[in-house]
Image: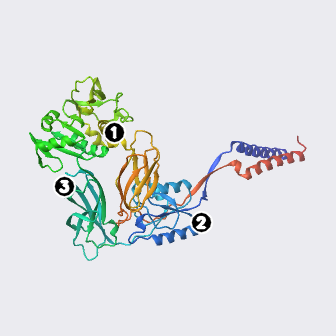
Amino acid sequence: MRRLTRTGGLVLLRATAVAALILLLWNPASSRTLPSEDQPIVLLDASLSMSGVGGPWRAALDTARALARQRRALVWRFGARVSAFDTTPPADGASRLGPALEAAAARGGEVIVVTDGLLDDIASIPADLRRRPRVVIQPRAPFFDAYVASVEGQRRVSTQDTIRLKVSYGTAGTREGGRGMRRATLAIYAGERRLVSRQVALPDSGILSADFTLPPSLVPRPGWTVLDVRLDGVRDPEPRDDARQFAIEVSRQPAAVIFASPPDWETRFLARTLSDVARVPVKVFVETEQGRWRDAATLTPVATAELTRAAQGARLVVLTGDPERVRHVVGPVAGSAARLIWSTGGQTGDWYVERPPASPLAGALAGILWDSLPPATGAGVPPRDSTAVVALTARLARRGTPRPIVTLDERNGARQVTVTASGLWRWSFRGGAAEEAYRSLIAGMVDWLLGERGAVGRERAVPVTLETPNGLPLVWRWTGADEPRPLAITLEGNASVLDTLRFDAAGRAELLVPPGVYRYALGGGPERGVVAVETYSDEWPPRSPSLAPQPGEARARIAAIGLRDRWWLFVIAIVALAAEWAWRRRQGLP
């Protein structure tokens, strides 16, 4: 019996030691939740709404400081961008929490957001990221505010044009003394000169619009002019959003004239894109009835003599629809004028545009995904000219012989582009990459037609918008044919600014300057123009909070711990082996 007990004890000790050694060699791991040791982060809203009328900037600043002391936390500012903490008043014209949350989540640890709840990108933040932070709301005091929301219109006009502007205005906040309508004066100024004004009724809330017409007698003198659209006669606590600015360029003669017979969607999209990419004033005449021509902007009848005079004075003449119906009305075009002949007739069907062959337009059309573009709805017979260069072709239903739809021709110093495809406006209508392809096609044709006289080929960079709200940077887009490179820029206005535009991989450069009207010039080039930084900001009018207070989610880190990290398993193996050896020695066993 004793022998059995002795044998069983030795086997048990040996089994225990072997099992412990096997587990140490295998080293299985288990997970454990540990408290986060990362430094907490306080995200402080530094957008303009925090320092506007009723803004809680001082209270939010004190709260952020107190949280930083209690938790030994790091403080970041967020608005239009994420920056290090400082006590300067907010200056960002947007409230974007998403980038700050993503950066804080990458560090781990507790995240606390101190804000007024007026955020611009809350809908685009993922739900799990939005639930994570603790949110402390410092509410903005309520008030009533009337403001000018936007101004829309044609930017490049001639001295003979009528300027049409659409002005949107509205109110927000709580109005004292009832909900009755109040009246104000909506006026347009050129400097200190009032051009036109109108009495308007302010709504209880929301936005209304009003159309203004400036006849040729009120058109500013040639050059760049910044119009001020003001809401006068409104006594609200926030006057900085009572005016918007709109920059226009006035020339003595339209640089491009479009004759459409009959007018169609192709004409409409062509006129808009041509004015945008070529940056020249465009005049459009349409034949609404047989033999009756009208100004496309006003629909007023136009005499044949005026059509001929417009064609003679333009640098670019565009004939669309049925060009033969236009030629006898317009008369002979000046020999130095470039011509774009765009025929919208021809054989109907799905004509798929193919990759362009070698031509002067090939560089401008590089990078376009042609297989993703909508097909043209028709293609006419190309001109029978052996000297013409084919720039673009299309196949009916992707079968058969390709048919030229864009050809280039130059004779006696005058250049001409002939387009025989219809339905290309659908590229622009679709938007996205297809719209960019349409813009590239129009820009390439205009660049080749105008040559060194055109703005497209000479300008290396252009501003994306001529007016920028307060607190947001001016943005330039690289338009040169070569790779983007830094450009020196000079801004002259209320203050002189000398800086450098540094373009990113997407060809965009930003420059943050104080509010004012600036005339800019890019060093070493012909780029000249006007940009305006407004006192207006979307942050000034009161809004409903888009973010509510929340406790946040407790953050912890998950650690994987192997058996080799547990000291007691080594002890068990050593004790079992030592006990077996000692027992065997005591019993006189080998």
Disc 2 marks which residue?
Answer: 72
Is mark 1 in CB contact (under 8 Å) with mark 2? Answer: no
Give x and y (percent) for residue 34. 61, 57
User: Residue 70 appears in which quarter of the rendering?
Assistant: bottom right
Q: Label 3 belongs to which residue?
A: 216
Pick whichever, 116 or 162, lies toward us: 162
- Image depth: mark 3 or mark 2 in front: 3
| Residue 50, label in figure | none
The amino acid beneath tag 3 is Pro
User: CA separation, marks 1 and 2?
Assistant: 62 Å
The disc, 3 or 2, on the residue closer to the chain's N-terminal end is: 2
Q: List the residue tagged with mark 1.
A: 452
Q: Which of marks 3 and 1 is nearer the N terminus?
A: 3
In the rendered image of this protein, does residue 198 appear above or below residue 563? below
Q: In which quarter of the image is residue 270?
A: top left
Q: Quadrant of the C terminus?
A: top right
For numbered disc 2, what is the local secondary structure? loop
Task: Choose the circle earlier in sequence order: 1 or 2.
Answer: 2
Whole-percent x, y for residue 494 in the image: 39, 63
